[in-house]
Image (cartoon, rainbow, N blue to C red):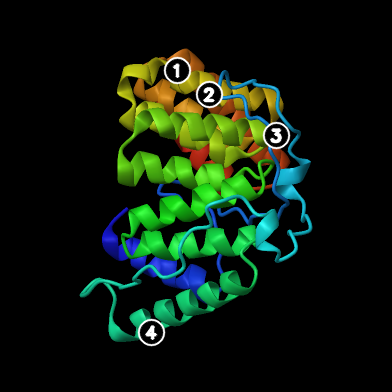
Amino acid sequence: MSTKAISIVGIVLVLLGGAVYFSRSPGTSVTTPSEGTASSTPINLGALDAVVEDSAGATSTIQVLPGDRALLPKPIPSLTRAFIPPSPEFNAQAKKILEDKYAVYVKELTVNPSNINTWLQIGILQRMVHDTAGALESWLYASRLNSKAAVPHKNLADLYMYDIHDNVKSESEWKIAIALDTKDTTAYRGLFDLYRLAYTEKASLAPGVLLSGLKVTPDNIDLMLPLAGYYKEMKDTTNARIYFEKALAEARVRGNTQLAAQIQAELDTL
């Protein structure tokens, strides 16, 4: 994603009050975070089918901790970091919007540092102005506030992949996110993109990620189409046709004639 695109998308997110999962992966959706209580529940970093807490905690609204700092994980990230939107990437108006929003989040967290949603939001702003260390710190802390929430791990995985270029840590975070919310399409696609685009020594694992997701959500077009595209790119016409046809059937069931026409066009090229 270009710098200009990041700026425009980011400003829109901020003006809308901010969805938190900010991904560069094509075709992924924005996911709204839950707020949660701190927990010491262990996370399994192993296989994609690792058994951990069920996804209800990640997708439901949970009461935040009372603002008692004694109950919070330590250390609490510093709220005195410099926040400087770079020029000419942001014009004066955009800078003012970002700076004002950042100040609001700092004030909120000063009063109640247990609010996972605000830590996620402030991390997005930090990433937008290329404060990678700040975004990392904010999202790591969010993950400690609620071990059941998948969103912090998706944000971290994306940050490790695109900004920090640590494929091992990105892989680990995507696996945690998938284990916490096995029906989250964006997490499967994030790990798929990691293997396909960056962690190329594990490229052979890419299709298996999407196949794992389809076992959980077998009618998911958002997993069928990249899988079909992958097989097409690999010259595996048989499997490409299988998944394009599955996606076509699902698009027709949903009455999405425009998507059905696009998928049919792909089939016609095989």
Q: What crowding class fits label 4: few (fewer than 14 Cα within 10 Å), some (14-19), or many (20 or more)?
A: few
Mark drawn on residue 205: 1
Which quarter of the image is occupied by the C terminus?
A: top left
Pick out the residue farthest to the left.
88
**Distance from Cα at disc 2 to Cα at disc 3:** 25 Å
Q: Callout 1, which amino acid?
A: Leu
Q: Callout 3, which amino acid?
A: Thr
Seen at 38% across and 84% down, the residue is 96
Regarding mark 2 in the picture, which secondary structure is present there? Answer: helix
**Distance from Cα at disc 3 to Cα at disc 4:** 40 Å
Task: Say above or below: 102 vs 257.
Answer: below
Mark 2 or mark 4: name the one nearer the start of the chain.
Answer: 4
Q: Callout 2, which amino acid?
A: Val
Regarding mark 1 in the picture, which secondary structure is present there? Answer: helix
Task: Say above or below: 101 vs 143.
Answer: below
Seen at 38% across and 69% down, the residue is 8
In-front residue for pair 42/156: 42
Would you name the residue on which mark 4 appears? 96
Residue 40 rendering spot, x and y as whole percentages = 68, 37
Q: In the image, is 116 to the left or to the right of 60?
A: left
Regarding mark 4 in the picture, which secondary structure is present there? Answer: helix
Pick out the residue farthest to the front.
70
Regarding mark 3 in the picture, which secondary structure is present there? Answer: loop
Q: In the image, is 38 to the left or to the right of 211?
A: right
Q: What crowding class fits label 1: few (fewer than 14 Cα within 10 Å), some (14-19), or many (20 or more)?
A: some
Mark 1 or mark 3: name the one nearer the start of the chain.
Answer: 3
Q: In the image, is 99 to the left or to the right of 138?
A: left
**Distance from Cα at disc 2 to Cα at disc 4:** 42 Å
Mark 2 or mark 3: name the one nearer the start of the chain.
Answer: 3
Mark drawn on residue 226: none
